[in-house]
Image (cartoon, rainbow, N blue to C red):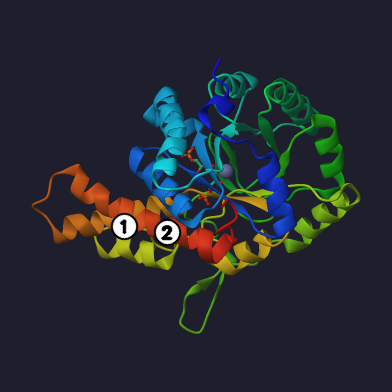
């Protein structure tokens, strides 16, 4: 058993309490490899932003769970080396799909886990989430639950369309499970194609404009938690799919037609509410891929991964820094 506290990691409890009060959101960035981890830690340490490092089941399958865990553990030491005296870093399991997987992460240094029972019937979701909470809380590990279904693909759980979170269920769910934060569905979805062109309108320049998020559902959820002084809400599927990176990919041989994400203005608005954690993965994939494609196009003779992965890392640092400073408002919240 490795407890996260021995590694200098923190859970989300105090982090979310501060974000809730302070009107900003903590970035939760997924990582699958060394360069993504280095870029996330560099951006967070430079900007003194609390940060959540997320490992999905897919990431574990790709990079090996043990390797990712050790990379996550290394994050704290690297952050200190970069001059961040008291790093506020969470190592989080993203979309845990079973008690056993959550337990394995809790027993091996994770400070936070998500149990995603959103696809289950309500009572089964409650029972599974409670089981994970009961185990996790013995070790001071925090737990994220989910109510409502996002459109698109949630790891191996797929949903063709959204089922927005029902505000009538949230207090009952949080009370009976004991979860520390709640992911809700208000129109975000995973991946780089969050809306079909048919769901969008076009602006004067002919660019796709997505429909707005269901802020009324978020407000409904927040209202229900008012009596208890608020509750940390999580938004998944919150990449904004920057045009700059889609264009970079497409200019240098890629084919990502009609890729579209959540406008940054909506994420900033959400950050100022009870939304304390905003999940971003696809934007990192786009920045990485765009930079690598550009590098190969400009340097066809290069074959050292440090050359093109170095460019990708630089681009990702820029992107993560932008999210922290200009979108989520978490800069300087972990001095
Ligand atoms: O929620 C989905 C995340 O973007 C993780 O995706 O399962 O492909 O690693 P992944
Ligand atoms: P994006 O695909 O929008 O980056 O969402 C990531 C996510 O929700 C991870 O859990
Ligand atoms: Zn997600």
Q: Is mark 2 within 8 Å of ligand 2?
A: no
Residue at the left extreme, as displayed = 301
What secondary structure is found at the residue carrying circle 1?
A: helix
Q: Which image quarter is the N terminus in?
A: top right
Query: Image quarter for residue 321?
Result: bottom left
What secondary structure is found at the residue carrying circle 2?
A: helix
Which one is in front, 41 or 56? 41
Left or right: 183, with 206 as reference point: right
Residue visible at 52% across and 80% down in the picture: 203
Q: CA distance from mark 2 to mark 1?
A: 12 Å
Left or right: 69, with 188 as reference point: left
Q: Earlier in the sequence, mark 2 or mark 1?
A: 1
Residue 104 sits above or below residue 55 on the image: above
Mark 1 neighbour density, 10 Å: few (under 14) some (14–19) many (20 or more): many
Residue visible at 81% across and 54% down in the picture: 222
Look at discs 2 and 1 and give the one toward the viewer.
2
For ligand 3, which image quadrant applies?
A: top right
Residue receiving disc 1: 290
Mark 2 neighbour density, 10 Å: few (under 14) some (14–19) many (20 or more): some
- x then y, percent, for residue 97: 60, 28
- x then y, percent, for residue 275: 69, 54
Residue receiving disc 2: 319
Which one is in front, 94 or 259? 94
Which one is in front, 256 or 54? 54
Residue 280 visible in the current orientation: yes
Left or right: 323, with 188 as reference point: left
């Amino acid at each position: 058993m490795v407890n996260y506290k021995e590694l200098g990691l923190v859970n989300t409890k105090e982090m979310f309490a501060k974000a809730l009060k302070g009107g900003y959101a903590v970035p939760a960035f997924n990582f699958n490899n060394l360069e993504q981890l280095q870029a996330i830690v560099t951006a967070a340490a430079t900007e003194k932003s609390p940060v959540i490092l997320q490992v999905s089941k897919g990431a574990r399958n790709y990079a090996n769970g043990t390797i990712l865990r050790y990379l996550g553990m290394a994050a704290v030491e690297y952050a200190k080396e970069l001059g961040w005296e008291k790093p506020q870093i969470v190592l989080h399991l993203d979309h845990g799909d079973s008690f056993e997987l959550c337990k394995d992460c809790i027993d091996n240094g994770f400070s936070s886990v998500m149990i995603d029972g959103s696809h289950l019937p309500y009572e089964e979701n409650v029972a599974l989430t409670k089981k994970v909470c009961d185990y996790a809380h013995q070790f001071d590990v925090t737990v994220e639950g989910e109510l409502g279904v996002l459109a698109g693909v949630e790891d191996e759980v797929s949903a063709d369309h959204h089922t927005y979170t029902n505000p009538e269920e949230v207090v009952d769910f949080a009370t009976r499970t004991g979860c520390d934060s709640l992911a809700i569905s208000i129109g975000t979805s995973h991946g780089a194609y969050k809306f079909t062109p048919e769901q969008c309108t076009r602006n004067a320049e002919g660019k796709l404009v997505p429909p707005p998020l269901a802020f009324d559902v978020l407000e409904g959820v927040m209202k229900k938690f008012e009596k208890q002084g608020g509750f940390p809400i999580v938004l998944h599927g919150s990449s904004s799919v920057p045009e700059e990176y889609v264009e970079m990919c497409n200019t240098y041989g890629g084919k990502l037609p009609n890729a579209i994400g959540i406008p940054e203005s909506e994420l900033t608005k959400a950050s100022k509410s009870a939304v304390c954690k905003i999940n971003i993965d696809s934007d990192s994939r786009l920045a990485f891929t765009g930079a690598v494609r550009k590098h190969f196009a400009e340097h066809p003779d290069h074959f050292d991964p440090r050359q093109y992965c170095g460019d990708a890392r630089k681009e990702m640092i820029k992107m993560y820094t932008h999210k922290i400073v200009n979108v989520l408002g978490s800069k300087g919240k972990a001095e």
